[in-house]
Amino acid sequence: MGMYIGKDRTARRSYGFDEIALVPGTVTINPNEVDTSFNIGNKKYNVPILAAAMDGVVDVDFAIAMGKLGGLAVLNLEGVQTRYDNPEEVLDKIAHATPEEATELVQGLYTKPIQEKLISKRIAQIKKAGVPTVVSAIPQRAEKFGAIAQEAGADIFIVQSTVATVKHISTEYKTLDFKKFCKSMKIPVIIGNCVTYEVALELFKTGPSGLLIGIGPGAACTTRGVLGIGVPQVTATSDCATARDHFYKKTGKYIPIITDGGMNTGGDICKAFACGADAVMVGSAFAKAKEAPGRGFHWGMATPHANLPRGTRIRVGTAGTLDEILFGPARLDDGSQNLMGALQTSMGSLGAKNIKEMHKVDIVIAPSIKTEGKIFQQAQRVGMGK
C-alpha cells in the first residue's frame, strides 16, 4: 500500500542499496566453495559481473581481457569503436577535454556515421582471441546490427534503451517487434532496461535470454536528473525478480535478470544478488581499470544525444588492473577492488552456496548501515576528498 503524497495521490516507498543490509543465517560456508556461476542461454559463466557497453569502459582489448578472466564485456556498436578506424585519437580528445567542453565535444564526435564494416571488424577481433563476444545496440538499429553481429560471430546481442517496453509508439520510425526479433536471432538476446514487475513480465513473454534492470542509477547517467525517471535498484530488482519467478512457475523457462548500474562497491553488488539478480552490469568500477579505454574518465551512453544528453563525463581515475578489480588483491579499502572476492566472502558469510540461495537471504531496511559507528572513516574520507 502506498503513502499519501497529496489529497488523492499515493506513492509506494522504494529503496536503494544504501538503505538495506544483509543478515547472516545459521550456516556459514568456506568462500572458496560457493558457486557464483549464472547462465545465459545454454552457456554457463563463472563471473556474474558484466562490463557495461560504454565507450570509456569497453573496447576490443578490454573485452578480450575481461573474457580471459571469465567475465563478459559488452561492446557498444554505436560508439567510437564503430565510427572511427582509429578510435584511440578520439578517446584521447575526450580524456583531455575540460569539463565545460566535454559534452559538446562528445556530441560532435558521435555525429560521424557508424561504419558497418567496423562492426564486423571489431567483433572478429574479439572473437579471434577466443573469448565470449557480446555487443549492444538500441532498438531502432537492432534488426540491422543484430544480423551483422550474428554473421560476424557474436555470442550474445543486447538491445538496450533508456526505457524498454513491448509496446512502443512512433510514427517517425519503424518500431522493433521484440518477439519477432528474439525468434529470428540464432544467438541469445538480452533486452533492457526496465524497472517494474509488469514490464518485466511483458518482456519475458517476447523470448529474451536475459533482462537488464535499472533506469538512471549509473554513475555517469543523468536520466533521473534530466527526465525525473527511475526506481531505486533494490526495489526495481526485487520487483523484476518476482516477475522472473512467476514467469518460471507458469512456463518452466528461467530467464535471468541483470541489475544494471548503481553499484559502486562489492557490498552493493552483493546486495543486488540478495534482491534477486542473477548477474550485475557495472560501468564506473571497470572504468577505473588500467585496461579501460577511457583513460580514467567515464561517460554515459546517452551523453552524445544531439539535443538532450542524459549522461555526463566523469573522472573516476585509474585504481588498478582489471584483474585486481575483479579478483584482487585489493590495494584500496573502499570496496572498489576484488569484487569477486567480496561476493564469495559475502555468500559464504550468509550461508548461500550459489546465486539462487543468495536470493533467499534475509534483508533488513537499515539507513544507518554505512554510518553507524563510522565517524572516523567518514572524517578520513572527507579529508581525503572522497
Image: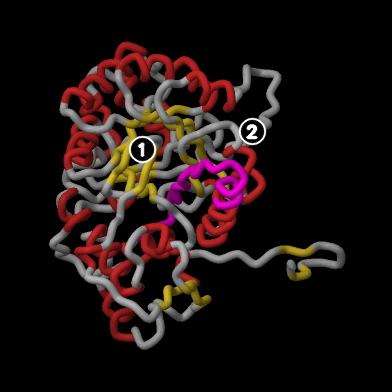
The stretch drawn in magenta includes residue 262: yes
At label 2, counting other C-alpha atoms closer than 10 Å, the crowd grade (few under 14, some 14-19, many 20 or more) is some
**Closest to the observer, 201 or 152:** 201
Q: Position of residue 367 (x, y in %)?
A: 50, 77
**Residue drawn where x is 41% and y is 48% of the image:** 220
**Residue drawn where x is 74% and y is 70% of the image:** 3
Badge number at residue 54: 1
Q: Secondary structure at mark 2?
A: loop
Q: Is residue 254 visible?
A: yes
Nearer-N-terminus badge (2/1): 1
The stretch drawn in magenta includes residue 171: no
Residue farthest toward the bottom in the current orientation of the protein: 373
Q: Is residue 186 above or below residue 198?
A: above
Q: Amino acid at mark 2?
A: Val
Q: Amino acid at mark 1?
A: Met
Q: Which residues are magenta?
A: 245-264
**Closest to the observer, 309 or 223:** 223
Q: CA distance from mark 2 to mark 1?
A: 24 Å
**Residue drawn where x is 35% and y is 67% of the image:** 352
Q: Is residue 149 above or below residue 75?
A: above
Q: Nearer the viewer, mark 2 or mark 1?
A: 2
Badge number at residue 166: 2
Question: Residue 81's image quarter?
Answer: top left
Question: Residue 98's image quarter?
Answer: top left
Q: Position of residue 259 (x, y in %)?
A: 45, 51
